[in-house]
């Protein structure tokens, strides 16, 4: 899957990943290949992939056709 993490200043991450764990506003979400379309709010917390962890301050996520786009400040 393609993961893009975007802030107002720059593109932080543009990478291929096998899994992403996100701090959803309604609880932790794990995204795997083939996930259905989803748009959701994110809360402050840790975004994790198998190779890295990133602290985010909240934002939005869109998942569509094995592409995950996270908009965060």
Image: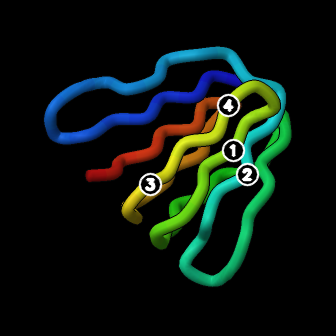
- Callout 4–callout 1 Cβ contact below 8 Å: yes
Mark positioned earlier in the residue sequence (2 or 3): 2
Mark positioned earlier in the residue sequence (3 or 1): 1
The answer for how far apart the CA atoms under marks 3 and 1 are is: 10 Å
Q: Which residue is mark 4?
A: 52
Q: Which residue is mark 3?
A: 56
Crowding around mark 1 (Cα neighbors within 10 Å: few <14, some 14 to 19, many 20+) is some
Residue 27 point in image, percent of width and height: 69, 78
The answer for how far apart the CA atoms under marks 2 and 1 are is: 5 Å
Quadrant position of residue 64: top right
Vertical side of 46 occupied by 51: above or below: above
Residue at horizontal 37%, vertical 62%?
57
Vertical side of 4 occupied by 29: above or below: below
Vertical side of 52 occupied by 21: above or below: below
The answer for how far apart the CA atoms under marks 4 and 1 are is: 6 Å
Residue 73 point in image, percent of width and height: 26, 52
Q: Which residue is mark 1?
A: 48
């Amino acid at each position: 899957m393609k993961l893009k993490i975007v802030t107002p200043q720059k593109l932080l991450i543009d990478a291929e990943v096998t899994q992403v764990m996100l701090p959803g506003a309604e609880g932790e979400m794990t995204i795997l290949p083939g996930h259905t379309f989803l748009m959701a709010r994110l809360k402050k917390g840790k975004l994790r992939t198998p190779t890295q962890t990133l602290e985010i301050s909240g934002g939005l996520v869109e998942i569509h056709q094995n592409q995950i786009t996270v908009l965060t400040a």
